[in-house]
Image: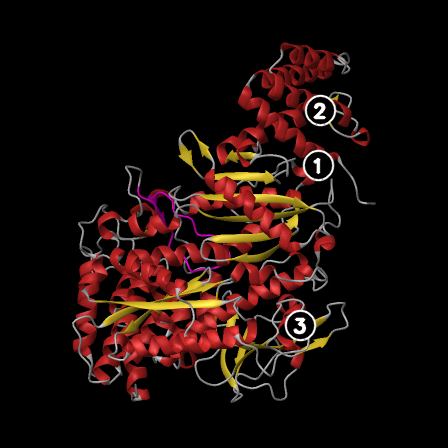
Amino acid sequence: MNTNKLEYKEFLLKSIFYDIDSIISFLSKNSENSEICQKFFCHLKNKFDKLSVDYDEVLNAVSKELEGIIFKRDKTSNNNEALKSIFTVFRESSDNNKYYPLSMIGNSIIYPDDFNKINNSHFFNDESRKYIESLNFEKILNDANIILNVLSKILSYVPYYKSEKEYGIGDISFYDKLKINTALSSCLYLLKNNSEEKEKPFALLAADISGIQSFIYTISSKGALKSLRARSFYLEIMLEHIADEILEYFNLKRCNLLYTGGGHFYILIPNFKDLKENILSIKNKINDWFIKEFSVDLYIAMDYEEFSFDDLKNTKNIFRGLSKKLSVNKQNRYNKEQLNILLFPRENEADFECSICNTSSKSTKKRNENLGYVCDTCYNLYKAGKYIINENNSITITNTKNNLDKEKIINLPSISENRYLYFGSINSEDSSVIRIYSKNNSNDKHINLYLGDYNYKKDDNVDFEYLLEGTDGIRRIGVLRCDVDNLGQAFINGFKDHSDIFRTSVLSRHLSLFFKYYINSICKGDIQFPNNKLFGDKYYHKEKHVVIVYSGGDDVFLVGYWLDVIDFAFDLRKAFKEYTDNKLTFSAGIGFFHPSYPISKMASQTGELEELAKNHIYNNKEKDSIALFGIPFNKKESDFEYCFNWQEFDKVCEKINLIFDTCYLNEESFCEDKVFFSASSIYKIKRLIELESLERDKINIARLAYSLARIKSDGSDDYIKNYESFKNNIYNWFLDNADRRYLNTALDLILYLKRDDSNK
């Protein structure tokens, strides 16, 4: 796979800037943008015009095929001034088309809206101008990956079009066009350079790492939160690293990485004649490393599906074929040599197995932190938690351990020579540096990775107790696990007759952007809509006392103060509905645990709650639900009463609001015009609700009326009004089966707020 490096570099630039004239034409229609166009895109055009590489036949052929996909349907509106939301095209309906404002990717979530409501004035605002003016043109043009980063930030919300009459559906951005254009063109270039021609010149490589959850949650209780984040972060970087190792092996760039997240990735590669042998070799090398480091805890399945230009128009069969191959792959994991290593003792086995990963194939040492005997990898992951929180936004991959802080180094798998993840700082010009990642657009000199890395107060001492400092109510950690409903089927069937390479890629990118990047803003309370405040302003934290453990392409694992976790879950749902134009839903489990409870149990039990939510049915609709608290050991899952559709849980919140409107809960919060709703009164009503659910006896209604009558009923006019409202609401809710269940949950949550066990 030898190539002329200079020629290939110029070819990639020519492919990236193939549509530069169209970009300038579009942006120059607005006179406000002319200055910035001159400073950036016109500068790039001058560079493009000087490129001497002659592969126009390849570039023209690829662009023609892609334009055939983009423009294959008649336009559905008279607007070509804004990018149509991919979710308008996804699961088409009779609703109005939604569009994105012309925007650069920044910290704020970009929502689609009606065309006449979007505001394009901030596309080239002061922040955007400063960003573009700060760019070092020669530096970014020296690396295709870096210029792709920059163009992703600038052009992701600028619609692709050729002329006033050519813009198709209008849901493909200039960035998406240049990304796929460059990915496919590079494949054809490399095949031609290798003197290969095929009827199906492309292949889609898929990889899926198994064992992620058990790997993350296999940690000791000491420093559990830092260890949890470190192991999650390590796997996320490892996935990106493996993808980049494969890209570099085939001489490809990040534009060929169509998707990465959730333990799997898809890479568009040339269909070389020896591709099968190369992929098998890569897979075996990575699994050899996994066996050495973690025994059978981690495994990577890997396979590919070849395809032609025609297959780009409908990718369903490609993904279905890959799914079947990966399933077979997982059922036949290891070759003979690997099985021999796993089944038979080796001379270099340690005297003691690692107390964290339980592997005996690596040497272990007695550690000072009451960890027992631990291998270097697990120990460094344990120590790495503080570096993830405190260190700068650069992540370095190096090929040596020499002269580096050993406690900041963690081994990584490799296709060729050794690779290490280093949490410290290294000069980027050092020969040992393989690549550097930057987080969340923090540095345009390195490969950008979007990572959900929100951590309350960015303190390296953060632990479960720390997250509860300064909070109200019961001292319990809330654990949220959620993921998008039916996402696999959505990708296969969501686009109907236009499930092509663009739409599947764009949908993946938007979902990753939401769950890997915008989620940080949601944790800060910045959703651009009224925030959820379960108990009102008094108990509300805009910046949540939470830590993101993991947030991938479609799922989230987050821990924190229980009330903030609930408020966050509602904000996440609200933002997700707006972001996806209400075309996708997610289900969630929220468990409540004592801070000293084992994290592995927190994770598994919250996973059970999430599964209950996934199986919930409301109004003949599955999923789109939330399950709370925990499953008692003496109850069947079918009897679990704390599982709700999100619309049902809105009714729980309504009841809380009505109770707060008419009552005060603690004597120190005395209000003469409101009813004192004591803990004993709440427990009495809850007991009657339980009896009514078991017995359905009219005596329970009489008991309720008696209990309500015992609450003070006289006072000022405002007090009497509040008392009557409170009494009637409780009574009427008790009579209705659904409302009685919602009331019971509302009372449970109020008791959580009233209870103070900080001294326990």
Q: CA distance from mark 2 to mark 3?
A: 52 Å
Q: Which residues are magenta?
A: 97-115
Q: Amino acid at mark 2?
A: Cys
Q: Nearer the viewer, mark 1 or mark 2?
A: 1
Q: Residue at x 39, y 77 (%)?
A: 282
Position of 681 compared to 230: left or right? right
User: Mark number for residue 752?
Assistant: 1
Q: Residue at x 65, y 62 (%)?
A: 219
Q: Residue at x 54, y 41 (%)?
A: 570
Task: Locate residue 6, reporting x and y percent.
Answer: 32, 88
Q: Give neighbour class at mark 1: few <14, some 14-19, many 20+ (Cα, 10 Å).
A: some
Q: CA distance from mark 1 to mark 2?
A: 16 Å
In this orientation, does residue 73 appear? yes
In the picture of the structure, the residue carrying the numbered disc 3 is 379
In the picture of the structure, the residue carrying the numbered disc 2 is 663
Quadrant, the C terminus = top right
Quadrant, the N terminus = bottom left
